[in-house]
Amino acid sequence: MVNKQKEIKVNPNSVLGTTYSQIVGVTVTDYDATLEFVYINPRQNSEGVVVARVTLPKNVALDLARTINITLQSHDKKTAKKN
């Protein structure tokens, strides 16, 4: 059985403020990368709203990606030692 990815419409002109985000969209140009953090209401889970949008220069975005990856790997190693 193949899991079919659910299509979710996002209103890009909506910003709620600080809240939990389940999805991050990434748009890249020649100069920068934009991250759009999307919240999906569990009661209306076919639509999402952008709760934050951050545009970073490409080198900063790459550094952020590396930092996230290193941090996740470090956390996983610590967690594995506890189990």
Image (cartoon, rainbow, N blue to C red):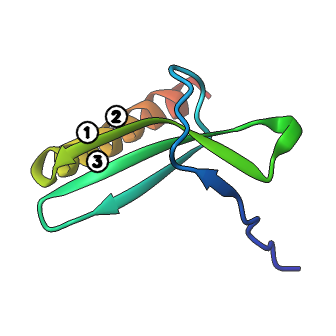
Residue that badge 3 annotates: 65
Residue drawn at (62%, 29%), measured in percent from left and top?
A: 83
Front residue (pair 73, 45): 45
- Residue lying at the far front in this picture: please name it: 13
The quadrant of the image that shows the N terminus is bottom right
Mark 1 belongs to which amino acid?
Answer: Thr
Residue that badge 1 annotates: 67
Disc 3, disc 1: CB below 8 Å?
yes
From the viewer's perspective, is residue 26 above or below residue 71? below
From the viewer's perspective, is residue 71 above or below residue 59? above
At which x and y percent is residue 65? Answer: 28, 48
Residue drawn at (56%, 23%), measured in percent from left and top?
A: 82
Task: Label 1: state its secondary structure.
Answer: helix
Residue that badge 2 annotates: 71
> Image quarter for residue 78?
top left
Give how far apart the Cα atoms at labels 1 and 2 are. 6 Å
Mark 3 belongs to which amino acid?
Answer: Ala
